[in-house]
Amino acid sequence: MPRGDKVPALLRTLPAVDALVTRVESHPGLAGIPRRRLTEATREVLAAERRQVLEGAAAAAHADVLAERVIARLSERGPFSLTRVINATGVVLHTNLGRALLSTLARERLEAVAAGYSNLEMEVARKERGSRYAHVDGLLRRLTGAEASLVVNNCASAVLLALESLARGKEVVVSRGELIEIGGEFRIPDIMRRSGAILREVGTTNRTHLKDYAQAIGPETGLLLKVHTSNYRVVGFTAAVSSRELAELGRERGVPVMEDLGSGCLIDLRRHGFPYEPTVPEVVAAGVDLVSFSGDKLLGGPQSGILVGKAELLGRLARNPLNRALRIDKFTVAALEATLYAYEAGEALETIPTLRMLTEAAASIRRRARGLLRRLTPDVHSRLGVTLVDATSQVGGGALPTVELPTAALALGTTEQPAQALDERLRLGHPPVLGRLLDDRLLLDFRTILSADLPALASALNRL
């Protein structure tokens, strides 16, 4: 550690904040960075260097070195924190990367609504206040066969609103095998307590029968809840009660029945090679009183929680003061309306990116991968050990957990260029590229790499 009488002299060699800001502010890599943010980063760099001096790291770094640190720090962050990335993980509905991509039409509708005023809550013809939900209610009723609908900010909110509105202070009967936990530690028992409802578990983890529900119904029963295990599967010696059976029991005993589909879908994907997954129209047709599902998973729209079912029940949810705290804004309305329109027009598989990526053939993906290979300089192949391999992608987003989608990927990594090091360098690039590490190789999965990403990805690999 430096002697105490030397410390002040060493600290005086540090440049002033304003002097260092002046030195770096004209750097082209900092274009668009507000001066206030530049000053803050400069203070952080100087504070770190001051600590080094005080802890005994001899003289302070030269002003040029400190300037480079400021530039590096701000260039890495860029002017905006939320930025576009290249998803090469092969996970189509990647929660951490924003889940569903919006269709071209949805993006156009967002721009139209954002650029000016809109009739969000105005009946223009009568010059009266309207409902924001009216813009999507007709679409949802026609597409699902339900009497009414309501949309909130996500599916967890939809479940909370339903439980609080229909079963506060009452028992909610749920199979033990359906007490799910999803990402972010969202658990059915926890949301039940928060809503004021009382959990009544029936059956066992692997087997629940209709008689279990029937025996649990009593004067304090407020709701029968069925939860679709969309993010895991219990297989083997199992038994579960169907939506239709539970709905019939509810009608007989005068108890409403709700089913949370989680990642709900409007169309049957079995003809595209997917396993059976109950669709929203199918569950509504089975007689379930209230169905909840996500807007930003298999549906392929914006983040939202959608409720469809009996008009009387949805009216109670809509009148709950909690609904205002959970309501959607004009951007969600615009994007959801455009997404639902694609289903009604019969264009969902062609125009909604999520469905298009999930159903794309492996041969088509391989052609896109070969297109990327043609963009690479000759020495990149040997230096990075680039090979085209067969792999499997995942649906993600807590949907279809057992499904593995055949895909094509580039595998990177050599002794001199380890996969982990390449992974880090790609993640820290502009734009960031996120792949997945497997058996000491970095895989770049082309199921989730868009055609528009190819030039930027090629440049990133050539720079490596």
Image (tube, grey):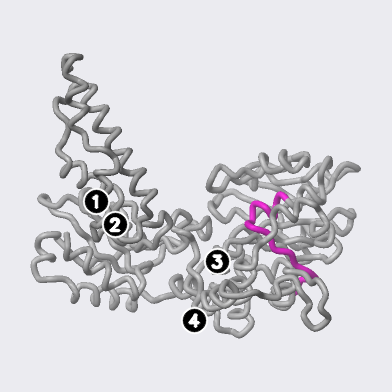
For the residues marked 1 and 4, what is the alpha-carbon distance in whole angstroms?
A: 48 Å
Label 1: state its secondary structure: helix
For the residues marked 2 and 4, what is the alpha-carbon distance in whole angstroms?
A: 40 Å
Say which mark, if any, is on residue 350: 4
Q: Indicate the amino acid at tag 4.
A: Glu
First to last magenta residue range = 145-160
For the residues marked 3 and 2, what is the alpha-carbon distance in whole angstroms?
A: 39 Å
The answer to which quarter of the image holds residue 260 is bottom right
Label 2: state its secondary structure: helix
Q: Name the residue under label 2.
A: 30
Q: Foreground mark, 1 or 3? A: 1
**Earlier sequence position, callout 1 versus callout 4:** 1
Circle 2/circle 1 CB separation < 8 Å: yes
Please report the residue visible at 54 percent of the width from the left and 45 percent of the height from the top.
Answer: 184
For the residues marked 2 and 1, what is the alpha-carbon distance in whole angstroms?
A: 8 Å
Label 4: state its secondary structure: helix
Please report the residue visible at 20 percent of the width from the left and 49 percent of the height from the top.
Answer: 421
User: Does the magenta portion include 285?
Assistant: no
Q: Name the residue under label 1.
A: 24
Q: Indicate the amino acid at tag 1.
A: Val
**Earlier sequence position, callout 1 versus callout 3:** 1
How far from the left and from the top, in percent, is residue 461?
20, 64
Number of marks drawn? 4
Say which mark, if any, is on residue 298: 3
For the residues marked 1 and 3, what is the alpha-carbon distance in whole angstroms?
A: 47 Å
Q: Can residue 238 be seen in this view?
A: yes
How far from the left and from the top, in percent, is residue 277?
59, 65
**Earlier sequence position, callout 2 versus callout 4:** 2
Question: Does residue 56 sit above or below 273 in this rendering?
Answer: above
**Earlier sequence position, callout 3 versus callout 2:** 2
Circle 4/circle 3 CB separation < 8 Å: no
Q: Can residue 439 be seen in this view?
A: no
